[in-house]
């Protein structure tokens, strides 16, 4: 339900729903399209390119190591970090089994963070530290595989900068109500936005509710706020 199709159907049928509208959902879900919208708006993102299954020439003009990801996938399914040309070919072939369009981008090594945005305002930053590898499908959903710290242990100015970029990313893509923006912080202090999640996990232990809790908003208050914000659209 994150790519905008259900939201568009609900709009046509006059059914009220929570979360962002169909257009911003579609932009955010498509990682290639999101880059085309966010980078011109000044949001820092890793350098990348798009390739499709029809491309006869699948050469990539970005130095290794690289990240290969399906353009419209979720939960990091089909995402690979590759260090050699052989690994790159294998990763591309495997990702094309899931989807016809891929995004290939420079691998940025850094600490992983996420910033929730509620009604245009950023919540406290959360740091995600997988015990092994990166924040892939297994580490996202296996209990105890990832250490999460909120508020993140960061200098105040870095936290505030991450929050501003999260707000800017959502504003640029037209994302309203609530969302979560995943970011990386490199050793030299550079920040990169990776993607916008327009329907972030909403279990009591998910990242967004943890961030809300750190801001003094209980789980019940958060769900009520999301409904209230969404209903404003229909006034």
Image: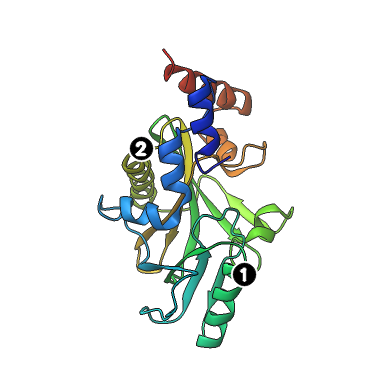
Q: Is residue 35 something that shows in the picture?
A: yes
From this view, report whether residue 133 is shown above or below residue 178: below
The residue at the far top in this view is 235
User: What residue sits right under mark 1 in the picture?
Assistant: 133
From this view, report whether residue 16 is shown above or below residue 89: above
Residue lying at 51% horizontally and 44% vertically, measured from the top left: 3
Q: Residues within 10 Å of mark 1 (few under 14, many from 20)?
A: few
**Pick the front one: 206 or 96:** 96
User: What residue sits right under mark 2 in the picture?
Assistant: 174
Task: Tell me the quadrant of the picture where the N terminus can be found.
Answer: top right
Give the Cα separation between the discs numbered 2 and 1: 33 Å
Q: Is residue 219 left or right of residue 231?
A: right
Q: Is residue 119 left or right of residue 95?
A: left
Q: Position of residue 157 (x, y in %)?
A: 33, 50
Q: Position of residue 119 (x, y in %)?
A: 42, 29
| N-term-proximal mark, 2 vs 1 | 1
């Amino acid at each position: 339900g994150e790519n905008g199709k259900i939201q568009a159907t609900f709009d046509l049928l006059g059914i009220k729903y929570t979360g962002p509208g169909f257009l911003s959902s579609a932009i955010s879900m498509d990682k290639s399209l999101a880059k085309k919208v966010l980078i011109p708006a000044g949001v820092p993102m890793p350098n990348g390119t798009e390739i499709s299954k029809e491309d006869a020439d699948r050469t990539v003009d970005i130095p290794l190591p690289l990240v290969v990801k399906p353009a419209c996938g979720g939960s990091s399914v089909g995402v690979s970090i590759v260090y050699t040309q052989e690994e790159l070919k294998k990763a591309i072939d495997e990702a094309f089994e899931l989807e016809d369009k891929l995004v290939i981008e420079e691998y940025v090594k850094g600490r992983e963070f996420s910033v929730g945005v509620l009604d245009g305002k950023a919540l406290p930053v959360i740091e995600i530290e997988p015990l092994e590898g990166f924040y892939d499908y297994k580490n996202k959903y296996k209990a105890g595989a990832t250490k999460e710290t909120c508020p993140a242990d960061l200098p105040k100015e870095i936290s505030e900068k991450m929050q501003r970029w999260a707000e800017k990313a959502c504003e640029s893509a037209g994302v309203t109500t609530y969302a979560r923006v995943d970011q990386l912080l490199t050793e030299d202090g550079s920040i990169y936005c990776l993607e916008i999640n327009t329907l972030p996990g909403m279990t009591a232990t998910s990242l967004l509710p943890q961030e809300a809790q750190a801001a003094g908003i209980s789980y019940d208050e958060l769900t009520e706020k999301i409904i209230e914000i969404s209903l404003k659209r229909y006034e």
